[in-house]
Image (tube, rainbow, N blue to C red):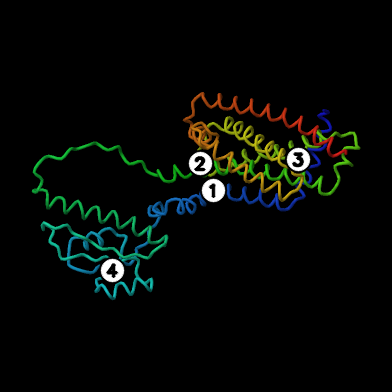
Amino acid sequence: MDLRHVYVITKKELRAINAEKTIILAILLQLFIAMFSSFLIVGLAAMYDPDALSDYSRQQYPVAYTGSPSPLEGLLRESGDFVVYEMDLRTAVTALEERKLSAVIWVPDTAPDADNPVKITLYTIKNDIQSSVVNSKLRDVFVAYENGLRGIRADRISSDPIIVALPPEVPGTNFYEFVYGLLIPLLIFMPAIISAALIIDMITEEFQHNTVETLISTPITFAEMVWGKVSACFVIVPVQAAVWIGLMVVNGIHVAGIVPILLHVSVASLLMILLSTFVALHYRERTSAQFIFSTALVVVLIGVLSLPANPANLIVLLSIGAAGSEHWVVLAMMAGILALGMAALNRYMHVVEKTALQ
C-alpha cells in the first residue's frame, strides 16, 4: 500500500467534507456551544437538576399563606425570597391556577406542642421549572420550621439520640456531576460518532454511483481508497476534541489529563470508524448500512459501558485528574484490538475488491 496514494485520497475527502455544508454546520454548531459553554451549562444543568437554578434566582416569588397563624408565616417573610399574601384557600388555589401565584401553603390549626404532627399542604404548578426553584427555596423554610417544632417538642425525648457527624456539604455538586460526568464525555465523543457515520456515506456513494470500477482502474488501489477515506474521517476527531477542550478551558472549566484524553478518544473513534467501514463495505447501500451501524453501535456501547473501566468513565477520571496508571493498560488493550481490526479490515477489503471486479 502506497501511503502517498492514501494521502491524496485523504486530501480529496477533506476537501469534500469542507464543501459539505451539513457537516460544516454541525462542526460550527459544536464550536458555538463550546465557546459559550459556561452560559449553556446553567441552562443544561437546569434540565439535569432543576433545583440547581435556585442558587441563581434572586427573584421574589408570590405565595399565598392560608390556614391558621404559625411561625411559618414569619419564616417565609424573613427569607427574602417570597412575597407572602394572606387569603382563603379557595381564592388562593384559583389564583395559582391563573399563575398569579407561585405556590399556596395551607397550615392546619395544630398547636406546635400538640401530640399530633403538623401536616402542611403545599400547592404548586405541575411540570414547571419555576415550581422546582420555588420548591427548593420553600424546602429551606420548611426545614427551619421543622427544626423549631423539634425544639418545642424536645422534652418528649426519653433517651439521648445518636449523633453522627455528617460530612460538610460540597457547594456546586450538581454542576460538578453534570459537567464532568455527562457534558465532557458527551461532547468529547460526539465528533467520533459523527465521523463513524460519515465514513458510511463516503464508501456507499462509491458503490451507488458505480465509481468503484473507475477508481480501481487508476494507480490507486481499492484498499488505498478506503484507507484514505478512513484517514479523512479520523483526522477531524482529535482536532475537534482538542478544540472542544480548549474552549471549555477558556470558559473556566478545568480539564486535567488533556493528552491522555485525546489518545483515548482517538483510539476509540478509530475503532468506531472501523466498525462503520466494515458495515459500509458489506451492505454497500447507505440506508441499510446506517441502520445496521446504528443498531450495532447501540449494542456495542451498552456492552462497553457496562465495564467499570470503559472509555467514558476513564474520560471522567482523566478530566478531574483522578485516573490511575490503569488507564494506560486499557489504552494498550484498545490499541491491540484496533491493530486486529485494521488487519481484518485489510483482508476484507481484498474480498470486496474481487467481488467488485466481477
Question: For the residues carrying marks 2 and 3, which lies nearer the camera in this image?
Answer: 3
Amino acid at pointer 2 = Ile
Q: How crowded is mark 1: few (under 14 residues within 10 Å), some or many (20 or more)?
A: many
Which comes sooner in the sequence, label 2 or label 3?
A: 2
For residue 122, which quarter of the picture? bottom left
> In what element is the residue under mark 1?
helix
Is residue 148 rendered to the left or right of residue 243? left
Q: Is 197 on the left-hand or right-hand side of 98?
A: right
Residue in view at x 26 percent, y 65 percent: 105
Query: Looking at the image, do the residues carrying marks 2 and 3 touch, with CB atoms under 8 Å apart?
Result: no
**Which is more toward the observer, 61 or 209?**
209
- Tell me, yes or no, whether the two marked residues, 2 and 1, touch with CB atoms within 8 Å: yes
Q: Where is residue 290 in the image (x, y as percent from the top left)?
A: 69, 47
Circle 3: is it few (<14), some (14-19), or many (20+) Cα within 10 Å? many
Residue matched to label 3:
281
Distance of mark 2 from mark 1, alpha carbons? Answer: 9 Å
Secondary element at image label 4: strand
Binning the other alpha carbons within 10 Å of mark 2 as few (below 14), some (14 to 19) or many (20 upward) gives: some
In three-dimensional space, the C-alpha distance between marks 2 and 4, rounded to whole angstroms, equals: 41 Å
Residue 191: x, y in percent? 64, 43
Residue of label 1: 37
- Alpha-carbon distance for marks 4 and 1? 38 Å
Which residue is under mark 2? 253
Answer with mark 2 or mark 4, whichever residue precedes in sequence.
4
Looking at the picture, which amino acid does disc 3 mark?
Leu
In three-dimensional space, the C-alpha distance between marks 3 and 4, rounded to whole angstroms, equals: 67 Å
What mark, if any, has residue 64 been given in the picture? 4
